[in-house]
Amino acid sequence: MTALNEPAIVFESVTKSYKKKEETVTALDCVSFTVDKGALVAIVGPSGSGKTTILNLTAALDFPTQGSVTVAGVGISKLAKEDLQKFRNETVGVIFQQFFLIDHLTVFENVMIPLIPRSMPSAEKSKRILGAIAQVGLESKSGRLPSELSGGEVQRAAIARGIVGDPSVLLADEPTGNLDVKRGLEIMDILAMESKEKGKTVLVATHDLRVLDKADGIIYLEDGRIAKIEGNRVKGNGR
Amino acid sequence: MAGRRRPLRAVSVVFAGFVTLIVLAQLSVHFFADAIPKHLVSENEAVLASIQRTSTELAFVSGALGLVFAGAVLIITRPRVAADIDIYRATGLPALSAYARVVRSDSVRPLEWVVLATALTALVDAHFGLDALLPVGLAVAFAALMLAWLAFLTYVSFSHAAFEGGGGRSG
């Protein structure tokens, strides 16, 4: 059982700048916040406000220019290459905004990807893959290609890939973005279940107000800064 | 049932087309030379040599164009292949493992085409007593180009400071 109020994600004075030609773009400007273990937190803000950058930093797919990011007790900037791969594979599960699945792999093969580096018997891998696929309700479509699925099914398959490795932190970038109300709510129910029933910390970047109903906390971003924070399971330096 | 979309398959079609051009160039001079009556060959050695030279040049140009076009198709398919590699990276696969998976799962067809086209060309060349070095060389160059390109994309993804698996957007 996870201890409540223990931080799963800690951003301390994080600044992230990119060089674009000769211009420096600041995607995040001295952002600090903590998210409790097991909380479902939404990051809300207009396009370009830094939502995806926060997810990328949390997933250790990118690194802060200044400040520190700690996820599940691990400082991502200090990780060696092998530890970084292990962290990405075991600690976080990422559900992408686009390019959800690899086109030429079936649902089963796509969901299998996070388990490739794991040393476990193939029967155990198959059991976990089928379990994750069943959890998102795609049992009958595990042999299908992404091109044979609807938008909602593709997203659910992407969630299955995100949860199959049993990560403690789930990151979802606009998971309901292109879906109708019903499909969007189904996706949010799955993510909420991961948080409420399995104690996983879920960080969702979204424009979708429907997501907010399920969230334990909301971080509002504006121009790379935290404008406001709501909820008692997330704390930070909102203006 | 939808087919499996493999972005690199287009490369193999381009490659096969140019291998065919090379073989046709080689065969054309062979049949042309055969068509000239034997008693005229000695009187037309200079003409025959010129035809053979032109044919060889055509074969080389076909080979070079084949590589250029295959390279262009590789560049065009880059976003899709790079996105796949990004997914492997984001799910914690080591770079070598990601590379191996891209080579195996995505470009296995083009590499099979290379082997098949090269084998057929070599057989045709051997049957007609022609020089198989050029098409075989092209096949090896093509395979090397594709493997090097995939290695480059893998390197870029794994050494990239910013992740673009979300479509390159930073919301």
Image (cartoon, coloured by chain):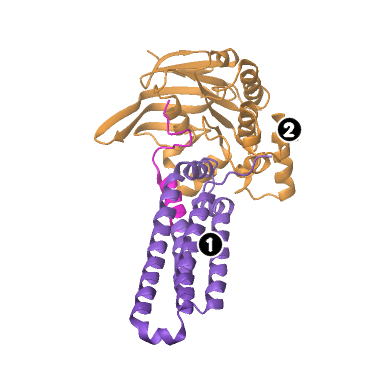
Chain colours: A orange, B purple
Question: Residue drawn at (51%, 50%), measured in percent from left and top?
Answer: B10
Q: Secondary structure at mark 2?
A: helix
In the rendered view of the protein, which quadrant contains the C terminus of chain B? top left
Q: Amino acid at mark 2?
A: Ala
Q: Depth-wise, is mark 1 or mark 2 nearer the camera?
A: 1
Q: Secondary structure at mark 1?
A: helix
Residue A177 forms part of the magenta stretch: no
Task: Tell me the chain of label 2.
Answer: A
Residue B161 forms part of the magenta stretch: yes
The picture quadrant where one finds residue B55 is bottom left
**Residue A110: x %, y % from top left:** 62, 41
**Residue A205: x %, y % from top left:** 50, 23
- Magenta segment boundaries in residue numbering: B148-171
- Residue receiving disc 1: B114
Asked whether, in this view, residue A177 is left or right of residue A78, the answer is right
- Residue receiving disc 2: A134
